[in-house]
Image (tube, helix red, strand yellow):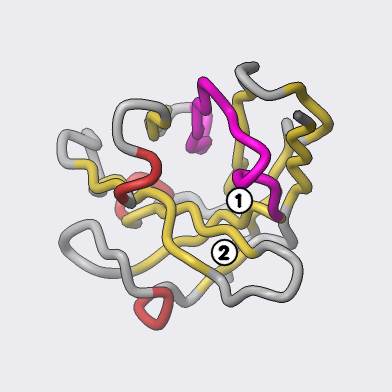
Amino acid sequence: QVLLVESGGGPVQAGGSLRLSCAGSEMSFASYVMGWFRQAPGKEREFVASISRWSGGDTTYADFGEGRFTISRDNAQKTVYLQMNSLKPEDTAVYYCAAARIVSPSTSADEYGYWGKGTQVTVSS
């Protein structure tokens, strides 16, 4: 069982930055592909970013995150991060961390078997 706990959300003004963290409990954390998803009120959950297992040398981003968001991982700390810059009001959502026993980064929520409870990000204009 993989337990994931997100932190780092909160209120921020447009143009500002936040770094989300997701701490995992699994001893083999490094062997999981990790992803971030978000869900805004009244909208479906959507993919944000994903990072490959082990060294994390391969990453994938949603179009809205390219150039603004950066996903990274620290396997020694069993933590994955999402650095978000130049935030916009439309980035307001609950952000979820997820883990998957797959080979490559994935944009599909169905491939992730473990999820955190989420952290709220609110961007004001």
Image coordinates for residue 89, horizontal then vertical, percent: 67, 39
Mark-to-mark CA distance, 1 and 2:
6 Å
Q: Residue at x 24, y 37 (%)?
A: 56
Q: What element carries label 1?
A: loop
Residue 23 lies in what quarter of the image? top right
Magenta segment: 77-93
Image-based side of 21 in relation to 10, left or right: left
Residue behind mark 2: 2
Nearest the eye: 62 or 31: 62
Residue farthest toward the right in the current orientation of the protein: 11
Label 1 Cα crowd, 10 Å radius (few <14 / some 14-19 / many 20+): some
Q: From the image, which quarter does the N terminus lie in?
A: bottom right
Q: Are marks 1 and 2 in contact (CB under 8 Å)?
A: yes
Residue behind mark 1: 25
In the image, is residue 92 above or below residue 107?
A: above
Image-based side of 59 in relation to 6, left or right: left
Image coordinates for residue 120, horizontal then vertical, percent: 78, 47
Q: Which residue is drawn at 75% across and 48% down?
A: 119
> Please, what is the three-letter code of the amino acid marked with disc 1?
Ser
